[in-house]
C-alpha cells in the first residue's frame, strides 16, 4: 500500500508518453487513438456494470448525452470550453441515469439489457425529430478552448489529443480506485449472491443504481471526447448498435482491469479502419463474424469474461498485499 | 449487550400468520423471546418453521399479525434494515460468495457492516480489515480455511462461515435455520458446540430451527414446537418433549401409554 | 364517434401486426430461454424474399393471390432453413453459456444477417405494393379500409389459434410445454429436448420471416427494417410476459391500441406510447402481465 499501484503507474506513464509522442504520430493514428479513447470510456461503464453481472445495451445514451453536452453549450450558451462541455454532459447524465436507475435497478439479465436498449432507443427516436438536437443531421461542435486558452490552428490537434489522453487518465484512475474499494468488491458480490448482500445490511438496488450513475458519467465523458474529435454530434450515438460496440469492446478485451476496454477499443477501431478499406459495405458483417468467432472459439476465455468476471486472475490467497490485476 | 432493556422482549410475534394462495404456512403464531434465551424451534417439514424465520428476518411480509424487535414494530421491514438494527440470520443452504475465499467473504461482511468506521470507498484490500476478518473466523474456529475458495470448503465450514458472516455486526438476535443440516454427524456436535460457546460468550439471543432432537435437547434453553403453522408447545425442553403430540408427530417416538 | 372507430380499427390492425412480429420471439424465449435479437434479421429476410417473390410472380403475370402465396411460402421456407442452420451451427454450442453471452451471440447473428440481406438484395428499397392495391378496400362503418390490412389481422388470429392448438392439443405441443416448464424433468421423462429446441427455433424463425412477408406489401423494403422491429417486438412480449403466448396477444392489443390512440390524438407522442405503456406495466408488474413470478428460495 505504501508503494504505487501498478495500474496507476502504467496509466500516468502511458499518458505522458502519448502526450509527447503525438507530434511524431501520423494523423490517422492520432485520430484513431482519439476515437478509441472516447469509445473506451462508455465501454468502461459497461465493464463496471458487468462486474455485477449486468449487461447494458444502452450505454450509447450517455455517449449521446456527453456529445450533446459539448454541442449544446456551444450552440446555446456560446461556450466552447472543453472542461465546461464535459461537466455539462456529466451533470445531464447524472440526472438522466439517476432517474432511469430508479426504474432499471431492480432488473437483471435479459431484462436489464433490453430495457437499457429500449430507453436509449426512445431518446434516439426523440432526437431525430427534434430541432434542438439538429434532427438526424446532428449539430456541429466548435474547435475547443481549454480554460481560456485557445490553441492556434496548428496546435489544435495536439491540444485535443493531449486533452483526450489526460481525461482518460483521470477517469481511468478514478474507476480503478472505485473498483478496488469495498464498494467495488460489493459490486462483484452482487453477482455472486444478492441475498447475502441484502442480509449484510446493504441494498442491492441502491448499489446497482449508484453504479448505473457512475457508468453514465464515464459514458458521457467518452461522448464529449468523441464529439470534440469528430467535430459533430448526431443522434446515432444513442442508437443501439453504438451501445452494442461498447459491449463488444468489453467482450474482446476482458474486464479484469480498467485498461482492458482501452485495448479493446483500439482493436475495434483498427478493425474498423481495415474493414472500411477492404469491405466498405460489410462492416456489420465483419463485426458480427469476429464477435461470433470469439464467442464460439474462445468460450473458455469468454466464460471468464462473463461468468467469472476476471476473478480467475485474482490471487486465490487474499492477503493484505495489493492485488495485482492483470489484463486478459 | 449495551442496548439491552430488560422490560421489552428481544423478539415478539403477535398473531403472525402467512398464507401462500390458499395454503396457511403460519397460523396466528404468538412468541416472545427474552434476552439471552436460546430457543429451539422444532416441527415436521412444512410446519412453518422457515416461514416464521423468513417473516422475522424480513424476507417475507406476514399476511396478518405484527413482529416487534425490542418493542419496536418491525413488521414488513426489509431484511437489510433489520440487519442494521441487529437481527442476523443464517440459512439452511449457506449464502456465501462462492467465487471468493473464506477470508474475502468475511472481509466483505465486515466492511459492509462496519462501514461507518471506514468509508465504503476505502480500499478493500486492507491489512486491518484482513486481520479483523481472520479474528472473526477464529472465533468460530475456521481461521485455518481462510485462504480456501468457498466452493472448496466442506459443508460444516460453510455453515460456520455463513453464521460468522451473519453475526459479523455483533447482532442482538441471531436466527439460525438448521445450523447442522447437511453437516456430517461427526461434525455436527462440533459445529453446535462452537456456536453455543460463541453465543454464550457474547450473551446473544438465539432462535434456531433444528431437526436433530439430541442437539435441541442439549443446546436449547427453551423449545417451541410447531405443527401446521401453529405453536402446540412452548417451554423448557423436558416439558415440550413430554408433550404427547410433540413426541408422536415431531420426534416420531410416541410416549409410552399413560405417560402423557 | 368516428374517431373512436378509426382508433379502434387502426389499433387492432396494428396489434395484429405486432402479434405476428412478437409471437416467434416469445415462443423461442419460452423454450430456449434466450432473447433472440436475430429475430429482427429473420423479419427482414422474410420481407425481402416476399418482395422479391411478388415482383417475380407479377412479371410472370400471376394474380395477387398467387403472388402472396408464393411470397409467404418463400419467406417461411427461407426463414426456416436459415433458422435451422443458425441453431445447429451456432446456438447449440452456446446453451450452457451465461445468458448475456447468448444474447450477444444473437446480436452478432443479427448484424451478419443484416449485411447478408444487403449483399443479396443491394442497398436500394424494394417495393411490392401490387397485392395490397389489388385487393382494394372494404367499408367498416363509415371507414374505408384496405382489405389487405384486415387480412393481416385474420392471419394473426389464425397464427394465434394455430399455435394454441399445436401447444395444447397435440403430443408435440405437450412436449414443448413440458420443456418450457422444466427442461431437466422433461429430458428425464424421455422428451427429446434437443429436437424440441431446434424445432422451436426453426418455427420461431419461420414466424419472424412470415411477419416480414406479411408486412412487405405495406412498406418500402429497405436496409434497417429489422432493427425497429426487434425493439418493438421485445416491448410487446415483455408487456405480456416473456414466453407467454396469451401474453403476446394482450401485449400486442395494449400496444396497438395505445399507439393508435396516441397517433390520432397526440401525434408527437406516438413514438413514446409503446415505451410509456411498457414502463407503466413493468413498474407495476416487473416481469410482465402473464409471467409466472420466480420465487427466490433461501
Image (cartoon, grey):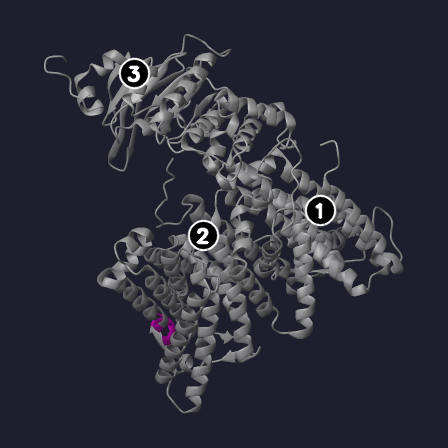
Q: Which of C266 and A101 is in front in this view?
A: A101
**Mark 3 vs 1: CB contact within 8 A:** no
Q: Which of B256 and B30 is in front in this view?
A: B256
Q: Distance between the residues labelled 3 and 1?
A: 67 Å
Does dot 3 land on a helix, a strand or a loop?
A: helix
* Region of the chain picked out in magenta, as a range: C140-151
B17 lies above or below C152: above
Q: How many labels does the image show?
A: 3
Q: Spot the residue most to the left.
A: B257
Q: Which chain carries label 2?
A: C
Q: Where is residue C109 in the image (x, y as percent from the top left)?
A: 51, 65
Q: Nearer the viewer, residue B108 or B143?
A: B143
Q: Is residue C269 magenta?
A: no
> Which quarter of the picture shows residue C67?
bottom left
- The residue carrying pointer 2 sits among few (fewer than 14), some (14 to 19) or many (20 or more) residues within 10 Å by Cα, namely some
Q: Where residue C277 is drawn, which disc sits there?
A: 2
Q: Where residue B217 is drawn, which disc sits there?
A: 3
Label 1 or label 2, whichever lies nearer to me, is 1
Mark 3 vs mark 2: tell me if same chain.
no
B22 lies above or below B188: below
> Which quarter of the picture shows residue A121?
bottom right
Q: Position of residue A87 (x, y in %)?
A: 72, 45
Does dot 1 land on a helix, a strand or a loop?
A: helix
Q: Spot the residue most to the top.
A: B7
Q: Which chain carries label 1?
A: A
Mark 1 — residue?
A: A88
Q: Distance between the residues labelled 3 and 2?
A: 58 Å
- The residue carrying pointer 3 sits among few (fewer than 14), some (14 to 19) or many (20 or more) residues within 10 Å by Cα, namely some
Q: Spot the residue most to the front.
A: B186
Q: What residue is rendered at 27% in x and 13% in y?
A: B237
Q: Position of residue C257 (x, y in %)?
A: 40, 59
Amino acid at each position: 500500500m505504501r508503494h504505487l499501484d501498478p495500474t496507476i503507474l502504467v496509466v500516468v506513464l502511458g499518458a505522458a508518453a502519448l502526450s509527447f509522442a503525438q507530434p511524431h504520430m501520423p494523423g490517422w493514428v492520432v485520430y484513431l487513438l482519439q476515437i478509441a479513447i472516447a469509445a473506451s470510456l462508455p465501454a468502461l461503464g459497461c465493464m463496471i456494470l458487468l462486474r455485477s453481472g449486468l449487461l447494458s445495451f444502452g450505454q450509447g445514451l450517455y455517449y449521446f448525452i456527453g456529445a450533446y453536452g459539448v454541442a449544446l453549450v456551444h450552440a446555446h450558451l456560446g461556450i466552447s470550453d472543453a472542461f465546461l462541455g464535459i461537466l455539462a454532459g456529466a451533470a445531464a447524465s447524472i440526472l438522466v441515469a439517476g432517474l432511469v436507475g430508479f426504474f432499471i435497478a431492480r432488473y437483471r439479465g435479459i431484462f436489464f439489457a433490453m430495457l437499457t436498449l429500449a430507453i436509449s432507443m426512445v431518446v434516439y427516436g426523440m432526437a431525430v425529430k427534434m430541432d434542438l438536437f439538429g434532427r438526424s443531421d446532428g449539430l456541429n461542435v466548435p474547435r475547443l478552448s481549454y480554460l481560456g486558452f485557445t490553441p492556434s490552428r496548428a496546435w489544435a490537434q495536439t491540444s485535443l489529443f493531449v486533452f483526450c489522453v489526460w481525461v482518460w487518465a483521470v477517469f481511468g484512475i478514478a474507476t480503478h480506485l472505485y473498483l478496488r474499494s469495498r464498494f467495488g468488491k460489493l459490486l462483484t458480490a452482487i453477482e455472486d449472491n444478492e441475498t447475502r448482500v441484502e442480509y449484510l445490511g446493504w441494498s442491492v438496488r441502491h448499489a446497482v443504481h449508484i453504479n448505473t450513475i457512475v457508468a453514465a458519467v464515464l459514458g458521457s465523458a467518452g461522448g464529449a471526447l468523441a464529439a470534440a474529435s469528430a467535430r459533430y454530434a448526431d443522434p446515432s450515438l444513442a442508437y443501439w448498435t453504438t451501445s452494442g460496440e461498447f459491449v463488444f469492446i468489453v467482450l474482446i478485451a476482458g474486464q479484469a482491469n480498467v485498461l482492458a476496454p482501452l485495448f479493446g477499443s483500439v482493436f475495434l477501431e483498427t478493425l474498423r479502419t481495415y474493414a472500411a478499406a477492404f469491405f466498405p459495405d460489410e462492416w456489420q458483417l465483419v463485426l458480427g463474424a469476429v464477435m461470433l468467432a470469439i464467442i464460439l472459439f474462445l468460450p473458455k476465455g469468454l466464460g471468464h469474461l462473463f461468468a467469472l468476471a476476471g476473478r480467475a486472475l485474482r490471487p486465490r490467497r487474499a492477503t493484505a498485499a495489493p492485488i495485482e490485476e492483470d489484463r486478459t | 449487550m449495551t442496548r439491552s432493556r430488560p422490560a421489552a422482549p428481544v423478539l415478539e410475534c403477535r398473531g403472525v400468520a402467512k398464507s401462500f394462495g390458499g395454503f396457511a404456512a403460519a397460523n396466528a403464531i404468538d412468541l416472545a423471546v427474552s434476552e439471552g434465551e436460546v430457543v429451539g424451534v422444532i416441527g415436521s417439514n412444512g410446519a412453518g418453521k422457515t416461514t416464521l424465520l423468513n417473516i422475522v428476518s424480513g424476507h417475507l411480509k406476514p399476511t396478518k399479525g405484527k413482529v416487534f424487535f425490542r418493542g419496536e414494530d418491525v413488521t414488513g421491514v426489509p431484511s437489510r434494515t433489520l440487519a442494521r438494527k441487529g437481527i442476523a440470520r443464517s440459512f439452511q443452504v449457506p449464502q456465501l460468495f462462492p467465487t471468493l475465499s473464506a477470508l474475502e467473504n468475511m472481509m466483505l461482511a465486515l466492511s459492509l457492516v462496519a462501514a461507518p468506521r471506514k468509508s465504503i470507498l476505502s480500499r478493500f484490500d486492507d491489512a486491518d480489515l484482513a486481520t479483523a476478518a481472520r479474528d472473526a473466523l477464529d472465533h468460530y474456529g475456521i481461521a485455518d480455511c481462510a485462504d480456501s475458495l468457498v466452493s472448496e470448503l466442506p459443508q460444516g465450514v460453510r455453515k460456520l462461515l455463513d453464521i460468522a458472516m451473519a453475526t459479523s455486526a455483533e447482532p442482538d438476535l441471531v436466527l439460525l435455520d438448521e445450523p447442522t443440516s447437511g453437516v456430517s454427524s461427526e461434525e455436527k456436535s462440533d459445529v453446535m458446540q462452537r456456536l453455543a460457546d460463541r453465543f454464550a460468550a457474547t450473551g446473544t439471543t438465539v432462535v434456531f430451527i433444528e431437526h436433530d432432537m439430541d442437539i435441541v435437547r442439549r443446546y436449547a434453553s427453551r423449545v417451541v414446537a410447531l405443527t401446521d403453522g401453529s405453536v402446540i408447545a412452548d417451554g423448557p425442553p423436558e416439558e415440550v418433549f413430554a408433550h404427547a403430540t410433540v413426541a408422536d408427530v415431531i420426534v416420531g417416538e410416541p410416549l409410552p401409554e399413560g405417560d402423557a | 364517434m368516428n374517431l373512436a372507430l378509426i382508433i379502434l380499427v387502426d389499433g387492432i390492425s396494428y396489434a395484429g401486426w405486432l402479434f405476428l412480429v412478437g409471437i416467434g420471439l416469445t415462443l423461442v424465449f419460452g423454450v430456449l430461454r434466450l432473447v433472440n435479437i436475430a429475430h429482427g434479421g429473420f423479419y427482414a429476410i422474410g420481407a425481402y424474399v416476399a418482395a422479391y417473390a411478388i415482383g417475380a410472380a407479377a412479371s410472370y403475370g400471376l394474380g395477387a393471390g398467387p403472388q402472396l402465396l408464393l411470397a409467404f411460402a418463400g419467406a417461411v421456407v427461407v426463414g426456416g432453413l436459415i433458422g435451422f442452420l443458425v441453431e445447429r451451427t451456432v446456438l447449440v454450442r452456446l446453451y450452457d453459456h451465461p445468458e448475456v453471452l447468448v444474447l450477444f451471440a444473437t446480436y452478432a447473428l443479427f448484424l451478419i444477417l443484416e449485411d447478408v440481406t444487403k449483399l443479396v438484395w443491394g442497398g436500394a428499397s424494394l417495393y411490392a405494393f401490387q397485392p395490397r392495391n389489388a385487393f382494394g378496400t372494404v367499408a367498416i362503418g363509415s371507414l374505408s379500409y384496405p382489405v389487405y390490412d384486415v387480412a393481416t389481422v385474420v392471419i394473426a388470429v389464425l397464427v394465434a389459434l394455430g399455435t394454441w392448438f399445436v401447444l395444447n392439443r397435440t403430443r408435440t405441443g405437450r412436449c414443448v410445454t413440458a420443456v418450457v416448464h422444466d427442461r431437466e424433468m422433461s429430458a428425464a421423462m424421455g422428451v427429446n429436448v434437443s429436437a424440441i429446441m431446434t424445432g422451436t427455433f426453426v418455427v420461431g424463425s419461420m414466424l419472424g420471416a412470415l411477419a416480414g412477408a406479411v408486412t412487405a406489401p405495406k412498406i418500402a423494403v429497405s436496409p434497417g427494417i429489422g432493427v425497429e422491429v426487434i425493439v418493438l417486438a421485445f416491448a410487446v412480449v415483455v408487456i405480456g410476459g416473456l414466453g407467454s403466448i396469451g401474453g403476446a396477444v394482450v401485449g400486442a392489443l395494449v400496444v396497438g391500441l395505445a399507439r393508435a390512440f396516441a397517433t390520432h390524438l397526440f401525434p408527437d407522442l406516438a413514438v413514446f406510447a409503446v415505451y410509456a405503456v411498457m414502463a407503466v406495466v413493468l413498474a407495476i408488474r416487473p416481469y410482465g402481465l402473464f409471467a409466472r413470478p420466480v420465487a427466490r428460495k433461501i
